[in-house]
Image (cartoon, rainbow, N blue to C red):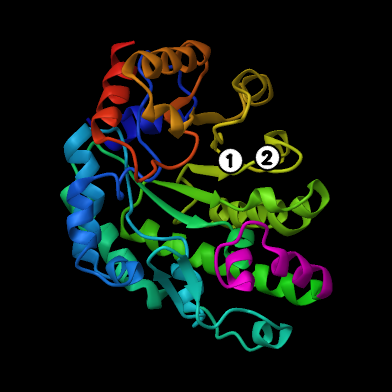
């Protein structure tokens, strides 16, 4: 079987399938003991991301365990800010920390020009994965949304409310749009290089969509996602790659994405399935959206929730089973196997 005939790509083409394809956000991660063994050898997570051979091995771990229908590049969305010399570091117990965050508008105007070759280690990992995966298994490449990258870059770390970022964008609107333009172009060039290296689909993570009100979301995030998608769809190298967007609780709802030329919407776990189907049917494929917390429950509860989702999507043309967020470190790998087997059994 070729990639073009794989369940994953067929679902992205909005075909109605008797068995949905399955993959999981953060399917390679700390919940796997084999991952933790490798991670313990690196002080800084980003240092690990810069080793293509290690990242290839990490991406293959869940494929070998669960026989999933798609693999995803192992990397991090903050590789782009790091390439802009913002000094990204992952500290134990803190998450990402920027040694050179954007704390004033002058820093934006002094940012270096993005060179996609600064992230050559990512493209090498893509090449390694494409050579290692079965020829029938699609490989997903990804990037963060321009807004999500900007929010991290301005705040300088993760945050509960990103208070500094919200204040900064209200006081430096022109410069923030310059930053978002720079990140949009960088994301495009980055994904184009991934495409030349062998990815078969793209996912854009708008992880901090929930920080903005409806008006600001359109201005600072949705418009730039639209620009990025348009660039990808117009370029001959990336034009045929299906594009998925995962947006976490965007103000205004997912219906506003109907104006973006997407192939698939990945639903956050609290999105209404019934409402999403009514909005998106015949327009885009849908991916999602089992609550990751369900994976801590007994198998009987898990099976009930999985069946509920599968039943709702049984007549939907273009459905991909996934979680409504990433797998958390406290999940038993056997639960992932149970979910995978249950989806295929049902």
Circles 1 and 2, Cβ within 8 Å, touching? The answer is: yes
Task: Please state the horizontal and vertical placement of residue 76, each as a whole percent of the image.
Answer: 41, 60
The first of marks 1 and 2 along the sequence is: 2
Mark 1 crowd level (few <14, some 14–19, many ≥20, 10 Å Cα):
many
The residue indicated by pointer 2 is 257
Q: Is residue 346 magenta?
A: no
Q: Is residue 170 magenta?
A: yes
Q: What residue sits 32% from the left and 55% below the top?
A: 74
Q: What residue sits 79% from the left and 46% below the top?
A: 214
Alpha carbon distance from label 1 to label 2: 8 Å
Q: Check the image and report above or below for 55 versus 178.
A: above
Q: What residue sits 62% from the left and 30% below the top?
A: 271
| Disc 1 secondary structure class | loop
| Disc 2 secondary structure class | helix
In this image, 255 relative to 68: left or right? right
Task: Please state the horizontal and vertical placement of residue 86, each as a whole percent of the image.
Answer: 52, 80
Image quadrant occupied by the C terminus: top left
């Amino acid at each position: 079987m070729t990639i073009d005939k794989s369940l994953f790509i067929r679902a992205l083409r909005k075909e109605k399938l008797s068995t949905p394809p399955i993959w999981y956000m953060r399917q390679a991660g700390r919940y796997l003991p084999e991952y933790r063994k490798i991670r313990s050898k690196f002080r800084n997570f980003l240092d690990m991301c810069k080793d293509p051979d290690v990242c290839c091995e990490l991406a293959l771990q869940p494929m070998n365990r669960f026989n999933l229908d798609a693999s995803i590049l192992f990397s991090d969305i903050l590789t782009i800010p790091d390439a802009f010399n913002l000094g990204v570091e992952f500290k134990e117990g803190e998450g990402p920390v920027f040694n050179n965050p954007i704390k004033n508008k002058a820093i934006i105007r002094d940012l270096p020009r993005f060179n996609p070759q600064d992230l050559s280690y990512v493209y090498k990992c893509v090449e390694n994965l494409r050579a290692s995966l079965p020829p029938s298994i699609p490989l997903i490449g990804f990037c963060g949304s321009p807004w999500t990258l900007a929010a991290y870059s301005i705040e300088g770390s993760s945050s509960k409310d990103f208070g500094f970022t919200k204040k900064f964008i209200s006081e430096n609107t022109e410069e923030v749009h310059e930053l978002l333009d720079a990140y949009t172009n960088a994301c495009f060039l980055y994904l184009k290089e991934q495409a030349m290296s062998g990815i078969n689909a793209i996912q854009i993570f708008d992880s901090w969509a929930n920080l903005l009100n409806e008006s600001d979301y359109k201005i600072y995030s949705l418009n730039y996602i639209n620009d990025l998608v348009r660039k990808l769809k117009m370029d001959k190298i990336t034009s045929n790659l299906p594009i998925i967007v995962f947006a976490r609780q965007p103000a205004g709802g997912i219906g506003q994405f109907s104006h973006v030329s997407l192939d698939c919407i990945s639903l956050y776990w609290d999105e209404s399935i019934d409402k999403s189907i009514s909005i998106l049917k015949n327009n885009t494929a849908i991916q999602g959206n089992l609550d990751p917390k369900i994976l801590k429950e007994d198998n009987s509860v898990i099976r009930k929730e999985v069946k509920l989702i599968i039943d709702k999507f049984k007549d939907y043309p273009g459905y991909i089973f996934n979680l409504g967020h990433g797998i958390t470190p406290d999940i038993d790998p056997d639960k992932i196997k149970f979910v995978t087997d249950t989806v295929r059994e049902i």
